[in-house]
């Protein structure tokens, strides 16, 4: 963990999250490294002092942000004549994606409040939710500009066309300016994206997945999704009824520090040899070639099925399983064009000329 001030804990179950977090914290304690924990999963229970633990409470955090959101939604409530119920917050599950946004905002505010000299351990929810959160963290400001601003422009134009009916129908049409997202929310997401951009790669992630031998082929997409988020280089704990001989082909292809089985006895020191294994120094390499250059990206678990590689406006776009990684071309190679892509596990190699 010395290479980065940020470490992610990702697991399928609360028990795995607890054991991994405890192991990481005890390792930091042995090294005299001060650390704070942000629990985005919301179910972490640690033994010992917990004064450095910030736990995400979805309902309380939603209530806190809902009061600020009401300022922007009030014109819509008036338009729809919902003034009587305007103070009622919808259930989190009723608004797709709201839970992901709220977790991102909680992480942004919590990270800002912590002392800079502390390392940060962020306990994430399940891997599928984690990939959604990580994509939002890296692309939050871009998504706000790309999705919300055009919507406001459309409403501004629509409102002008409906203005002649406003008095006749007794409508109260809100101005586009009154519907803009909170500057505080925007600034927090921008600050968080900047913090992540400044981190020294690779960001370490300790990942626990529940798996039996029959599940391993399907695990490849889950492993690749985390790397495609452009943030983390994982250590992988596969907990289940697994024989090393049946896992060897996958271990060789993934090229990751991997722990197999139930890691008994259930003590944090059982993870120490696994946590001590070194990570690769680089996740993205640019190499000269006779006809141009090659870009090698560390993407363990990536498979050909469903893989798309494109080049758009000076960026390589790698998409698989609903997750997209954007890789900017270096300035010296900005005029080159993507010609080929092949998987050399755990690497994706892209040729440009």
Image (spheres, grey):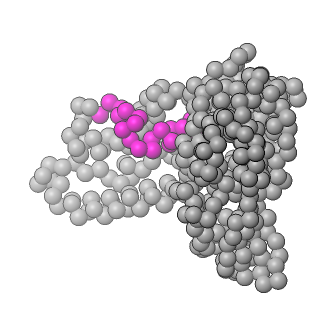
The quadrant of the rendering that contains the C terminus is bottom right
Q: Residue 70 appears at what percent x and percent y?
A: 37, 37
Q: Residue 108 appears at what percent x and percent y?
A: 61, 39
Q: Residue 78 appears at what percent x and percent y?
A: 25, 41
* 39, above or below 316, in the image: above
Determine the residue positioned at 71% across, 78% down: 352
Name, please, the residue furthest toward the top.
Answer: 48
Name, please, the residue furthest toward the bottom.
Answer: 291
Report the side of 116 relative to 131 (left or right): right
Q: Main secondary structure of the magenta part?
A: helix
* Front residue of 251 and 205: 251
| Residue span colored magenta | 86-108
Report the side of 140 relative to 149 (left or right): right
* 211, above or below 163, in the image: above
Report the side of 308 relative to 25 (left or right): left
* Front residue of 48 and 345: 345
Determine the residue positioned at 73% across, 68% down: 349
Quadrant assignment, res 19 = top right
Name, please, the residue furthest toward the right.
Answer: 31
């Amino acid at each position: 963990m010395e290479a980065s001030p940020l470490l992610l804990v990702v697991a399928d179950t609360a028990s795995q999250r607890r054991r991994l977090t405890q192991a990481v914290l005890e390792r930091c304690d042995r090294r005299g490294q001060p650390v704070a924990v942000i629990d985005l999963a919301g179910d972490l229970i640690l033994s010992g002092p917990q004064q450095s633990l910030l736990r995400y409470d979805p309902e309380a955090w939603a209530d806190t942000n809902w009061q600020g959101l009401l300022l922007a939604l009030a014109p819509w409530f008036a338009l729809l004549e919902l003034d009587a119920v305007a103070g009622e917050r919808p259930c989190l599950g009723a608004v797709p994606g709201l839970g992901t946004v709220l977790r991102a905002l909680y992480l942004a505010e919590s990270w800002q409040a912590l002392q800079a000299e502390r390392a940060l351990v962020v306990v994430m929810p399940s891997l599928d939710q984690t990939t959604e959160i990580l994509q939002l963290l890296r692309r939050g400001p871009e998504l706000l500009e790309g999705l919300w601003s055009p919507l406001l422009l459309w409403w501004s134009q629509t409102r002008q066309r409906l203005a002649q009916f406003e008095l006749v129908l007794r409508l109260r049409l809100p101005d586009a300016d009154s519907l803009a997202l909170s500057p505080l929310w925007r600034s927090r997401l921008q600050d968080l994206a900047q913090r992540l951009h400044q981190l020294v790669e690779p960001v370490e992630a300790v990942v626990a997945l529940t798996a039996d031998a029959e599940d391993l082929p399907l695990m490849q997409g889950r492993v690749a999704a985390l790397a495609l988020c452009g943030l983390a280089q994982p250590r992988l704990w596969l907990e289940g009824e697994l024989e090393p001989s049946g896992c060897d082909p996958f271990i060789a292809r993934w090229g990751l520090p991997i722990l197999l089985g139930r890691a008994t006895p259930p003590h944090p020191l059982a993870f120490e040899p696994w946590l001590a294994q070194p990570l690769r120094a680089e996740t993205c390499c640019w190499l000269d070639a006779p006809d141009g250059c090659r870009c090698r990206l560390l993407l363990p678990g990536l498979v050909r099925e469903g893989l798309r590689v494109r080049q758009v406006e000076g960026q390589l776009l790698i998409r698989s399983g609903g997750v997209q990684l954007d890789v900017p071309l270096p300035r010296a190679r900005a005029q080159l064009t993507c010609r080929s892509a092949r998987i050399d596990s755990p690497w994706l190699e892209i040729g440009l000329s």
